[in-house]
Image: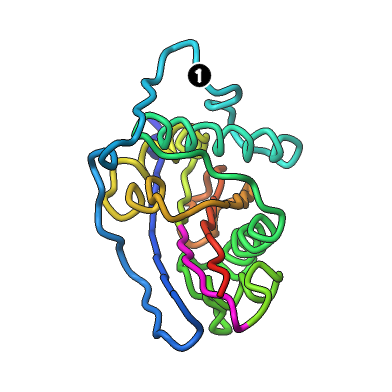
Amino acid sequence: MARVRPATLLILTALCALAGALIPHSFGQAQTTTAPRKGARVVKAHAADSCADATLTPDEGNLPSIRAATLCLINRERGAHGESPLKPDAALESSAQAHSDSMVSADYFEHVGPNGQTPLSRMRSVGYIANSRDGYVIGENIAWGTLWLGAPRAIVAQWMASPGHRANILNARFRETGIGVSAHVPASVSGGQTGAIYTQDFGAIIAP
């Protein structure tokens, strides 16, 4: 009798905050915020608010729908905790998509690329952080899942169950986001199964 390999899901998080160009940055888990901010309006989620395509398995032909479903789920979580929705940003999406594609092609699962590319350097290279005078707050969540665990609902559920990822998702300072999805998993961790890898970049630019 053949053995069936179970579906697998793995996640990582990073956070970087700068109020000015000369302040040092660090990557690591953000502090968890489990309660809404004082005075925030809490919006309860209802079944009717379900996000389209949340259980869709990613493939090369449906990635725009996967990104939209993921953002819908993220913003529903933010709304349920009294936070404003994140706005999609083309530069952050470019940064996130490049990282997801890189993790698949170079066969790794980390925030830092094989040539030393960090979330900060990637966001600079696509023009999200346009000049050295601007301050910024940025963060990043990554995840991969095989089979049905590669669908948006499973990815976001695992992010919300992890303190660092949850903190990035509910961070009141973030205003924009970009989501990059590849309908593949790095070969060294896939076990020969189909799946998907996700990068979500978060940001806010602080004008001088």
Residue type marked 1:
Ser
Where does residue 22 sit, x and y in percent of width and height? 46, 88
User: Which residue occupies the extreme right position in the image?
Assistant: 61
Q: Position of residue 40 (x, y in %)?
A: 33, 36
Point out the image quarter for the N terminus.
top left
Q: How is the image coloured?
A: rainbow
* Stretch of the chain drawn in magenta: 132-140
Q: Residue at x 48, y 42 (%)?
A: 146
> Which sits in the foreground, 80 or 56?
80
Residue at the outermost top position? 48
Res 207 → quadrant: bottom right
Q: Magenta segment: does it hold 137?
A: yes
Question: Could you tell me which residue is drawn at 55 percent across and 43 percent down?
Answer: 195
Under circle 1, the secondary element is loop
Residue 114 is left or right of residue 127, and the answer is left
The front one of 59 and 68 is 68
Counting every numbered tag in the picture gives 1
Q: Residues within 10 Å of mark 1 (few under 14, many from 20)?
A: few
- 119, 152: nearer the viewer: 119
Any magenta on residue 189? no
Position of residue 118 measured from the top left corner of the image (x, y, whole percent): 52, 76
Q: Is residue 33 above or below residue 106?
A: above
Residue 189 horizontal/vertical position (percent) = 45, 57
Query: For mark 1, what is the residue?
Result: 50
Residue at left offset 25%, top offset 40%: 38
